[in-house]
Image (spheres, rainbow, N blue to C red):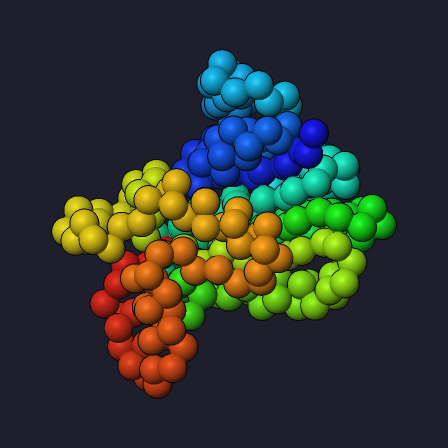
Amino acid sequence: MASALVTGATSGLGKEFCWQLAEQGHDLILVARNQERLERTAQQLQTVTRAKIDILAADLADPRDLTEVCKRVSSVDIVVNNAGFGLGESFLNGALDRELYALDVMVQAVMATCHFAGRAMRERGRGAIINVSSVAADTGMGTYSAHKAWVRAFTEGLSEELRGTGVSATVVLPGLVRTEFHERMGADLSDVPQFVWGDPGTVVRDALKAARRKQVVVTPTALYKAVGGLSRIAPRSVVRAVTRRLPHT
């Protein structure tokens, strides 16, 4: 039976990845910081599915915890790098320590896990890496956008290194999705129209289908495919003008 490791596994897209992978018959390693939430999520999954569920409480910004996660990714067939969060404030008005923490979680941890997983999978001749970026990668919405732009560029480069090895690397660029993400960063998006919100189930299904096809870049939902396309061809001055009016993430 195939196995998968998911970071940020107890909420949002991470939790949805766990449900869909477990329902498809994958054994799972759930990675998140909160032990209680990990145990609760694992219990829910085991109650409904027949998957074997292991948990690993780890802070991806802690070098010792990250080392343990890297050991575990070397033994699985699928790695989903989903962990991330919005800062909810501008770079200059925020604390540098928090910015550096976000960089560790959303950039350094992705690099480290992909290094260990990619080498092990390449040796076995099979496997899939799924990295969650964002349509924000094409905007100038603070350091979150910069982190997600790095994830996209890095994954595209990794996919070329893995070409012909039997291992795939896929980067997912979701738009606004109904999860805890914005609530946790304190953003009030109650005025955002209903039609712009994506469904977590749809996003994850599209991501897993893309990984099975060895597709490198996937933007779930037609709306955000169009948004992503426009943001890439529009003059950067126009993109900056639009993002000035959006809340910082």
Identify the image quadrant of residue 53: top right
2 to the left or right of 101 = right
* Image height of 32 relative to 196, above or below: above
In percent of width and height, residue 94 lies at: 40, 55
Nearer to the camera, 169 or 131: 169
Residue beneath the point at 62% across and 31% down: 26
Number of numbered callouts drawn: 0
Quarter holding the C terminus is: bottom left
Residue beneath the point at 58% across and 52% down: 211
Looking at the image, can residue 101 be seen? Answer: no
In percent of width and height, residue 79 lies at: 64, 43
In percent of width and height, residue 236 lies at: 37, 82
* Image height of 28 relative to 210, above or below: above
Identify the image quadrant of residue 151: bottom right
Looking at the image, can residue 239 be seen? Answer: yes
162 to the left or right of 188 = right
Residue beneath the point at 59% across and 33% down: 31
In percent of width and height, residue 140 lies at: 39, 70
Identify the image quadrant of residue 50: top right
Give the residue at the far right of this rendering.
Answer: 123
